[in-house]
């Protein structure tokens, strides 16, 4: 199994994924709805489904007659079940899932963790039926370059340097559209949106939990020190501190051939 830095065995990963669902599912559902392909009878594939919240929603939307496949390296944190929800364990870098089958293929917050993102994207596209739609949502950490105060900017500088060393690409958002064009998708479009949040909010809690899980690795990498981590955590607890972090970059395209 490829190494994934926020493995599902980590204490608190279930809670962290639940927070991701709370923070990101409304946006993800809105972008899926805009594609107008998810209807009764449709077949959908979500890759890197985490706790399966989007796949469970898709299963409801394609019923009756349709099928939602939830695919991940690790299915252990999926508690949802439905007769037309299929759980499938696998690595998207290794190959397509039922080539040429799905009306919608989507992946959120997955490709930035994948060492060979190009191979993963080719396999996502190969899973589409002709005329099917691909929707990717990935981070672009552009907003952290203007974060305040300077210590928080320094924290993010260390974070990005650590992530690069670990093969994580927190600037992949900007690369999605050209890569999909190179693979041959058509009518590519997208948008990026960023949450503006303060300390003690769900977004701040998300970062506090993430940093708690990764603290030892962040410090031993030498890219961050205790003082920067503690300053960032203090900001995340201060409701008077306002900031933004991720440009959540949603890009879609269509598989030609119908
Ligand atoms: C950051 S989590 C995001 C989960 C969910 N998509 C969300 O946004 O809430 C990344 C997920 O991708 C899965 N993943 C990472 N690399 C993968 C790969 N090569 N193939 C399939 N799933 C992968 C992880 O196991 C994890 O569940």
Image (cartoon, helix red, strand yellow):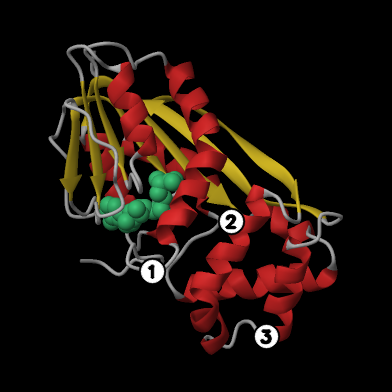
Q: Earlier in the sequence, mark 1 or mark 2?
A: 1
In the drawing, does residue 158 fall left or right of residue 124?
right
Q: Residue at 64% x, 75% y: name it.
A: 158
In the drawing, does residue 119 fall left or right of residue 110?
left
In the rendered view, would you say 61 is above or below 235? above
Q: Earlier in the sequence, mark 2 or mark 3?
A: 2
**Depth check: 141 or 40 in front?**
40
Q: Give coordinates of residue 197: x percent, y percent.
A: 74, 47
In the rendered view, would you say 38 is above or below 233? above
In the drawing, does residue 199 fall left or right of residue 68?
right
Q: Give coordinates of residue 41: x percent, y percent.
A: 21, 12
Q: Is residue 185 visible?
A: no
Label number found at residue 206: 2
For the N terminus, give its image quadrant. Answer: bottom left
How far apart marks 1 and 2 lie (CA) works out to 15 Å
In the rendered picture of this protein, how many numbered marks are placed on residues?
A: 3
Q: Residues within 10 Å of mark 2 (few under 14, many from 20)?
A: many
How far apart marks 2 and 3 lie (CA) works out to 19 Å
What SS does tag 3 mark? helix
- Residue under numbered circle 1: 10
How far apart marks 1 and 3 lie (CA) works out to 21 Å
What SS does tag 2 mark? helix
In the rendered view, would you say 31 is above or below 158? above
For the C terminus, give its image quadrant. Answer: top left
Q: Residues within 10 Å of mark 3 (few under 14, many from 20)?
A: few
Q: Residues within 10 Å of mark 1 (few under 14, many from 20)?
A: few
Q: Give coordinates of residue 144: x percent, y percent.
A: 71, 58
What SS does tag 1 mark? loop
Label number found at residue 226: 3
């Amino acid at each position: 199994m490829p190494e994934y830095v926020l493995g599902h065995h980590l204490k608190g990963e279930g809670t962290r994924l639940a927070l991701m669902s709370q923070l990101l599912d409304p946006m993800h559902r809105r972008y899926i709805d805009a594609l107008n392909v998810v209807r009764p009878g449709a077949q959908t594939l979500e890759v890197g489904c985490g706790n399966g919240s989007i796949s469970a929603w898709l299963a409801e939307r394609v019923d009756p007659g349709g099928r939602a496949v939830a695919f991940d390296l690790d299915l252990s944190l999926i508690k949802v079940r439905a007769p037309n929800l299929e759980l499938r364990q696998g690595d998207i870098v290794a190959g397509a899932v039922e080539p040429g089958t799905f009306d919608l293929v989507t992946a959120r917050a997955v490709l930035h963790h994948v060492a060979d993102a190009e191979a993963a994207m080719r396999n996502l596209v190969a899973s589409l039926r002709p005329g099917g739609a691909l929707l990717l949502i990935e981070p672009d950490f552009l907003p952290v370059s203007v974060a305040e105060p300077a210590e928080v900017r320094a924290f993010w500088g260390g974070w990005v340097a650590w992530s690069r060393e670990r093969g994580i690409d927190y600037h992949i958002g900007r690369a999605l559209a050209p890569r999909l064009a190179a693979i041959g998708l058509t009518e590519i479009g997208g948008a990026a949106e960023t949450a503006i949040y303060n300390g003690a909010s769900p977004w701040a809690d998300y970062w506090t939990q993430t940093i708690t899980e990764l603290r030892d690795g962040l410090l031993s990498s030498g890219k961050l020190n205790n003082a920067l981590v503690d300053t960032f955590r203090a900001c995340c607890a201060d409701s008077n501190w306002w900031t933004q972090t991720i440009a959540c970059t949603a890009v879609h395209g269509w598989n030609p051939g119908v």
